[in-house]
Image (tube, grey):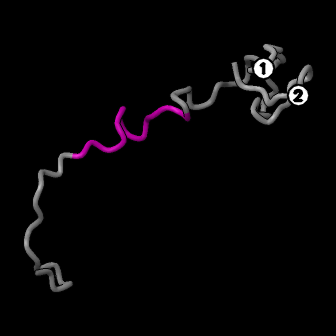
Amino acid sequence: MPRGDGTGPGGQGRGGGRGMGRGQGQGRGRMGGPFAAGPGGNCVCPSCGQQVPHVVGQPCNQRDCPKCGTRMTRQ
């Protein structure tokens, strides 16, 4: 049994983990999208389809649709 001094029995298993996948620290954003969608593009209302230009620094999901008031999503 371990005594707290590192002299316990050896561990079992192969230790062949691969980390986070896709190389070192590379992955995708939430919901499989890009890391960040970039400065261009539009915000789209999922209810009525209204589109407005995306404003840099203001996420689409924090904007309300000017037509119906529903929270918008990124196109």
Q: Give the amino acid type for the residue marked by disc 2 in the picture.
A: Gly
Name the residue rendered at 49%, 32% in the picture: 28
- Where disc 2 sits, the SS reads loop
Would you name the residue on which mark 2 appears?
69
Magenta span of residues: 17-30
Choose between 57 and 48: the one closer to the eye.
Answer: 48
Name the residue rendered at 56%, 26% in the picture: 34
Tell me where residue 5 sits by quadrant.
Answer: bottom left
Q: Give the amino acid type for the residue marked by disc 1 in the picture.
A: Ser
State which quarter of the image contains the C terminus. top right
Choose between 40 and 66: the one closer to the eye.
Answer: 66
Would you name the residue on which mark 1 appears?
47
Where residue 17 sits: x, y (%)? 24, 46
- Where disc 1 sits, the SS reads loop
Mark closer to the chain start, 1 or 2: 1
Tell me where residue 65 sits by quadrant.
Answer: top right
Name the residue rendered at 88%, 28% in the picture: 69
* Residue 37 falls left or right of residue 60: left
Mark 2, other Cα within 10 Å: few <14 / some 14–19 / many ≥20: few
Choose between 31 and 42: the one closer to the eye.
Answer: 31
Query: Could you tell me what secondary structure mostly forms the magenta stretch?
Result: loop
Q: Is the residue 3 above or below the residue 40 in the image?
A: below
